[in-house]
Image (spheres, rainbow, N blue to C red):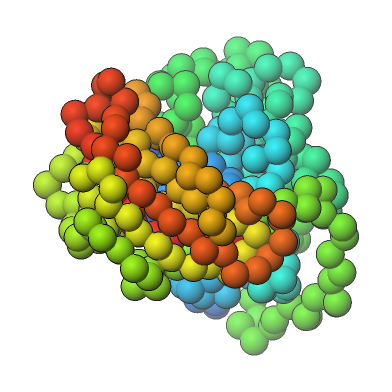
Amino acid sequence: MTIAFLGGSITEGYAASDPDKTSWRALTEQYFREKYPHRTITGINAGVGGTDSAFGAHRLAEHVLTKGVPDLLFVEFAVNDGEDRGRSVQGMEGIVRQMRRLSPNTDICFLYTAADKNMTEGVPFNIAVHEEVAGHYGIPSVNFAAGIRDLVQARRIRFEDILPDRTHPNDEGFALYAGFLREALDAGLGPGNEDADARPAARPGYSLPSPLDAGNYEYGGMQGLHTAGASKGFSPKVLASEPLINWRFKTDHLYADAPGAELQFTVQGSGAGLLLLCGPDSGIFEYAIDGAEFRPVNLFDDWCLNVYRPVIALFPGPDGKRKTRNVAVRNTGMKDERSTGTALRISNLLYH
């Protein structure tokens, strides 16, 4: 039985004393081992700190499906998704449609974790958007944030005691999350199956409904730098000694810091993009898709001041059709006033 966990730092296990033992993800894996003692339980940790559902849709195939075919996929992005409703729908819907298309027998469950923005009365914005997608596709969800809010209001816990930074649980908070999920799984799965040979029946034919957003990232994915075409001014590098957060994968990338350095590549999709390693010396670059006018992109933010981390830039196609896209990326040699340099570090090529 394979269980996959797609989400941000809360799924990855940040702030747990031992992410592989005390995070909600690890405790949930242990739940399945106890419930089905005669089966081999495999967990796929596809949690990456600081990533939203749009990035999740683009890395689903690479970080989940290349590791195995999951029987169950948990999706957790209610904290990392921002105030852009369209991007959240495109990301969450893209994950669902992509999984239904590529692995139709995989069950999916959305999870909503706690943070200040998800603790308000009623249905907080990000949770409401995710629930819109869940309702459209018949996806079950478990609302950890509502469970925490109920306990806080009943004065059984203090919010800051279990989420010291008001976002990431400590071990006590992770145990509460795992408990909420355990209750939902017990209700949905019933008694544990002791028969090692028993397998669930194949899902009947699943017909996807019309999308909520035709621009969703159902076809989102990453392709390696080896697929890039012509380039000038770029050289291969590995990010080794610099402080790096939110990335436990290879840091091989193409590097350029001179104005006019250019990279060209081709993808199949309605649009394209880049996965970049952004940090203290990141500069401003520009892109052109299908020969259109170059557009500048400045991704420098407060996080870049001290560390490097993965950041995606998405380039929509002009017509929304899936076809061959020719993309050019060029270093401008300009920078944000807070940056120490004009570096451009390209880790992966994206398509959607």
Kindly tell me whether residue 109 is visible in this rendering.
no
As drawn, is 269 to the left or to the right of 17? right
Residue placed most toward the observer, 176 or 44: 44
What is the quadrant of the N terminus in the image? bottom right
As drawn, is 295 to the left or to the right of 94? left
Q: Residue at x 53, y 45 (%)?
A: 293
In percent of width and height, residue 43 lies at 48, 64
Tally of numbered tags: 0
Residue placed most toward the observer, 220 or 175: 220
Q: Quadrant of residue 320?
A: bottom right
In percent of width and height, residue 316 lies at 61, 49
In percent of width and height, residue 68 lies at 51, 75
Residue placed most toward the observer, 183 or 330: 330
As drawn, is 54 to the left or to the right of 146? left
Above/below status of 125 relative to 104: above
As drawn, is 277 to the left or to the right of 44? left
**Most distant residue in the bottom direction:** 197
Q: Residue at x 58, y 41 (%)?
A: 77
Q: Residue at x 40, y 21 (%)?
A: 164
Above/below status of 126 relative to 200: above
In percent of width and height, residue 126 lies at 67, 31
Q: Quadrant of residue 45?
A: bottom left
Residue placed most toward the observer, 130 or 140: 130
Q: Residue at x 45, y 48 (%)?
A: 287
What is the quadrant of the C terminus in the image? bottom right
Above/below status of 79 relative to 265: above
Kindly tell me whether residue 207 is visible in this rendering.
yes
Above/below status of 171 relative to 148: below
